[in-house]
Image (spheres, grey):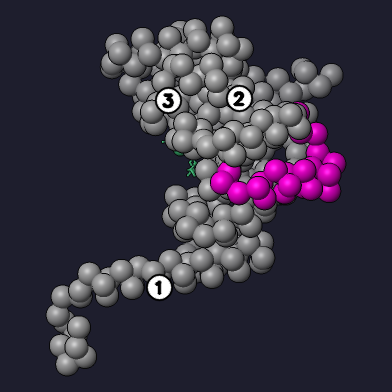
């Protein structure tokens, strides 16, 4: 494109690509700084059993931007994933979660791990190092990986997953139903928990097929010793239907929203007190 074309003309494809790349690079720089400046936060969403007793929490990252306010992960995780910045972010998240663990009673914490982190050796070494530095028990940690990352797993990725599991960390298959995981995968993947995607849970009341699929999955889970979590439980009806379909854990706005650690009132979490005593 020539300079004389001036302003106002349509930007060419190459130009918009260039602008996208600049925007991504700018965001990457800003995010890197945010990690070092501790402008990230973890919010925790409770996971409950069929009696609504809290059994654990999922850690969800947010970016507290000085100008733009609280930015949800969907807006910056993909940016981090387009470079090794996701490793740095993953380490920040894991370290903070381990530090917070002491303030979450004896309950488990689930941490989202990007499929990109699994592609490098770094993850296992980082996990070992942070566990040692923080003195955190690996038995209280669940790593959530997406169904797609799991089904696309190369032998190297599988080796890493098995290594993490051998260290005592449990593995959950996140957003189950959005990828292409066949039932036979469930026999071979080294997983302890399946989290059924919200799209299935919200359809339980409307769609007979969703009911049949979720029931079949919880049946497989029982046989394989895999716990099945209903994600995105937004109404009491969702909760009742997911319970009827055999799910053993529940997470969603109808139970509790993700919240900063300071706002979690452990004295109100009955299950914790009952179990701790
Ligand atoms: P996810 O792991 O599937 O997390 C569940 C998402 O659903 C969270 O969104 C949560 O706030 C939201 N949610 C919970 N209950 C309900 C509900 O009843 N209804 C609806 N509509 N949504 C509900 P959030 O926090 O915006 O996170 C979005 C995604 O970003 C996560 O999906 C996860 O894939 C990713 N993510 C979050 N934190 C991290 C992190 O520390 N590392 C990595 N790699 N990814 C993360
Ligand atoms: Mg998750
Ligand atoms: Mg999920
Ligand atoms: Mg999700």
In this rendering, would 184 be left or right of 249? left
Eyeballing the image, is 32 above or below 72? below
Asked whether the viewer can see residue 84, the reply is yes
Assign a secondary structure to mark 3.
loop
Residue 99 image offset from top left, x and y in percent: 77, 46
Name the secondary structure under disc 1.
helix
Q: Which residue is mark 1?
A: 22
The quadrant of the rendered image in which ligand 4 is seen is top left
- The residue singled out by tag 3 in the image is 181
Residue 134 seen by the camera = no
Side of 146 relative to 129 (left or right): left
Gap between marks 2 and 3 measured at Cα = 13 Å
The residue sitting at the bottom extreme is 4
Of the two numbered discs 2 and 1 in the rendering, the one whose residue sits closer to the viewer = 2
Q: Quadrant of residue 242?
A: top left
In this rendering, the answer to whether 160 lies above or below 139 is: below
Residue found at x 43% / y 66%: 24
Q: Is residue 7 left or right of residue 91?
A: left
First along the sequence among labels 3 and 1: 1
Magenta stretch: give its range.
118-142
Tell me the quadrant of the picture where the C terminus can be found.
top right
Residue situated in front as seen by the camera: 257 or 28: 28
Q: CA distance from mark 3 to mark 1?
A: 36 Å
Q: Residues within 10 Å of mark 2 (few under 14, many from 20)?
A: some
User: Which of these two is toward me, 189 or 28?
Assistant: 189
Number of numbered discs on residues: 3
Q: Position of residue 116 (x, y in %)?
A: 53, 48
Q: Which label sits on residue 190? A: 2
Q: Residue at x 59, y 66 (%)?
A: 32
Badge 3 density bin: few <14, some 14–19, many ≥20, Cα 10 Å: some
Closer-to-camera residue (55/147): 147
């Amino acid at each position: 494109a020539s300079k004389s074309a001036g302003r106002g003309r349509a930007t060419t494809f190459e130009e918009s690509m260039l602008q996208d790349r600049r925007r991504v690079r700018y965001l990457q720089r800003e995010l890197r700084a945010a990690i070092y400046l501790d402008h990230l936060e973890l919010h925790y969403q409770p996971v409950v059993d069929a009696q609504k007793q809290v059994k654990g929490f999922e850690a969800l990252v947010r970016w507290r931007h000085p100008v733009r306010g609280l930015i949800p992960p969907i807006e910056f995780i993909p940016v981090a994933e387009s470079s090794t910045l996701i490793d740095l972010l993953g380490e920040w998240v894991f370290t903070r979660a381990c530090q917070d663990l002491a303030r979450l009673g004896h309950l488990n914490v689930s941490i989202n791990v990007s499929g990109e982190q699994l592609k490098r050796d770094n993850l296992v070494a980082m996990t070992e190092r942070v566990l040692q530095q923080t003195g955190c028990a690996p038995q209280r940690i669940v790593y959530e990986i997406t169904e797609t990352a799991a089904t696309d797993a190369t032998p190297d990725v599988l080796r890493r997953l098995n290594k993490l599991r051998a260290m005592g960390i449990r593995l959950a298959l996140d957003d189950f139903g959005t990828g292409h995981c066949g039932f036979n995968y469930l026999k071979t993947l080294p997983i302890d928990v399946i989290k059924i995607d919200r799209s299935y849970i919200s359809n339980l009341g409307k769609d007979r097929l969703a009911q049949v699929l979720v029931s079949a999955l919880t049946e497989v889970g029982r046989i394989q010793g895999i716990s099945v979590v209903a994600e995105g439980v937004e109404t009491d009806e969702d909760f009742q239907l997911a319970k009827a379909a055999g799910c053993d854990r529940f997470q969603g706005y109808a139970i509790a929203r993700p919240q900063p650690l300071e706002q979690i009132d452990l004295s109100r979490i009955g299950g914790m007190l009952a179990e701790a005593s």
